[in-house]
Amino acid sequence: MQFPHLFSPITLGATTVKNRIVSTGHHTYLADGVPGDALIAYHRARAEGGAGLIVSEIVAVHETAGFASQLLNASSPDTIGAFAQLAQACHEYDCKLFAQLFHPGREILSTKSGFAPIAYAPSAVPNERFHIMPKPMSVALIEDIIDGFGRNAAHLLAAGFDGVEIVGSHGYLPAQFLNPNVNQRDDAYGGDFGRRLTFVRQCIETIRQRADGLCVGLRLSADDLEPNGLNNDSIVRICAELDDEVDYFSVVAGSSATLGASVHITAPMGVEAAYVAPMSATICARVNSPVLVTGRINQPQEAEQIIATGQADLCGMTRALICDPQMPQKARAEQSDDIRACIACNQSCIGRAHKGLGISCIQNPQSGRETQFPSLIPTTRKKRVLIAGGGPAGMKAAVIAAQRGHRVTLCEKNTQLGGQALLAQRLPGREEFGGIVTNLLREMDHAGVAVERNCPVTLNTLREKNPDTVVVATGAQHYAPDLEALDTSRTCSIDDVLWGNAKVGASVVIADWKADWIGLGLAEKLASEGRHVRLYVNAALAGEALQLYTRNHYVGRLRKRGVEVITHARLFGSDENTVYFQDTLSDEPILAEDVDTLVLAMGRQPVCELENALAGEGIDYAAIGDCVIARSAEEAVYEAFETAIGI
């Protein structure tokens, strides 16, 4: 077997898990209160795909734990039936099911009602990220919350769950009790090291008493990666002390408490793959309990190496399973090249969740929409389908149409397929974005899509090929604003820079209208080449359009490079060595002087000539992606999927 360690069974408490691949707890926004059809279908897909263990999303253990909408809650026996349906769906495929038991403590931004929260913590130590001053917990409240852990666990046991996991990671309530910088009590729950463990110990004890037989795990950040957090040495000591009391440890990194540390809750592609494994190795060296590690483990070969070298016993591969629920089956069948690899873009998974929307994946629109798109229905009438454009939208449409049984030809005007993804992968920390192209090329090959490169599509092309249906996916092109005062002799586009067609001077100004990854990435690239870079953003902050963990990661990288970021800046014009902006709040002038090169990152405009030409020709067609209006790969791929299943 290619992955002998990954596909060996392991025992956690009294539970035997068939392999070491885990879908760890993550908030899907697919259910409110109790599991419903959407959440059950979501987890069933991953169980059917071969995951050994699923840890379902957070179950709030107390009324003071409600930090967001659509939280699960198992406090009432009335919920047992709904949770039982989820357990049955996973067990049908010999997949074990655990639940996360959760209380955020002071890490709470708002309540379900939308009102400012009353947050509780061990002590009145403020949260930096959300600017929350918590109220110290009374002993009575602490005891009530501990009781909530036991009560919820008992109901989950009755529902058929195999285990529970206490969420003490990312600076949430158990971690607040463990952290001497947050826990400043001097009673049974705080003071010296031993008393700071009391809360966690009593949570474990009440679960054991009221839900005997459940596997009990503890999730901790191996390092909070923030100045006032728990470091790796502290966590190793805590794990060694609690080793005999839990059945396994689940290890992650980072903390919700600061902007920088919260990046690691869902680390973006700019963070090294499997980067938490060396931290988990320090815990493995000190404990006998199995250790589960999570953090950018996207490929089975990475997981195999981690387990084989003793850095962990199980691997959380959550986003990999969001992207490709069949990943375990493909890996076991030694078909790793067929795995749709996660690129850690954070757009549809945590990005949608942070908007309160159901989780999905930019590469796999079925993910999180299993009830909406349960399976591809083969066509009853095979058509000749021509796809005009080989970016992510065109490629995905070609794959789905071909998988349904149509005869598909994709025509791309350039030599390479990939569209804007080819530019994205040229930016520092965005190299993995090209993975979407690699994945789609493999899927197109399997589906039998015919590809014609250097083949722009015109009306003559269509008359010659005579397709039954045309999908227009011609994308978008760089937008250059029509400014009378703009000196074009020292101006170039981001496309010119990334394709190496521009001569860029030593002092660079980037005019960033979109405030997305393009301006950020180009600023880092040019700064890393030794240039003095100033990024002028027509927004309140750089990367404003990005998912916040992604934004904060890349803005932090710019600061390390010494890039100057100027916000609220509207491009007005330029002359020989000065670029002129207006403050978008006051309309006052902003001058950037001593500029050698102005790079325009001003967004993109649709390429819609083919769509316009088709109007009135009597040819059946649909337009998708950026040629409709320039957006992101998420919209492009979703529209491609939706269009192709309707052909």
Image (cartoon, grey):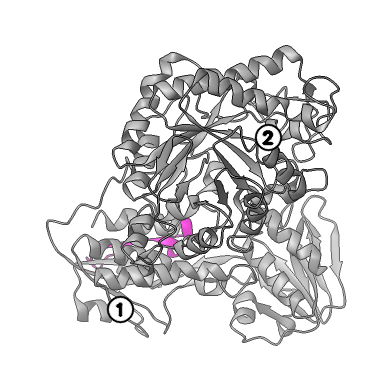
Residue 625 inside the magenta-drawn segment: yes
- Which residue is at the front of the view, 197 or 599? 197
The local secondary structure at tag 2 comes to: loop
- Of the pair 387 and 314, the residue shown nearer to us: 314
**Quadrant occupied by the C terminus:** bottom left
Marks counted in the figure total 2
Q: Does 500 sit above or below residue 522? A: below
**Mark 1: secondary structure:** strand
Of all residues, the one furthest to the left in this rendering is 380
Circle 2 residue:
172
Q: Which residues are magenta?
A: 615-634
Question: Can I make out residue 200 in this image?
Answer: yes
Q: Decide: few, some or many residues near mark 1? Use Cα within 10 Å; few <14, some 14-19, many ≥20.
A: some
Vertical comparison of 279 with 86: above or below: below
Instruction: Tell me the quarter of the image containing the N terminus.
Output: bottom left
* Residue type (three-letter) at the residue carrying disc 2: Tyr
**Residue 451 got which mark?**
1
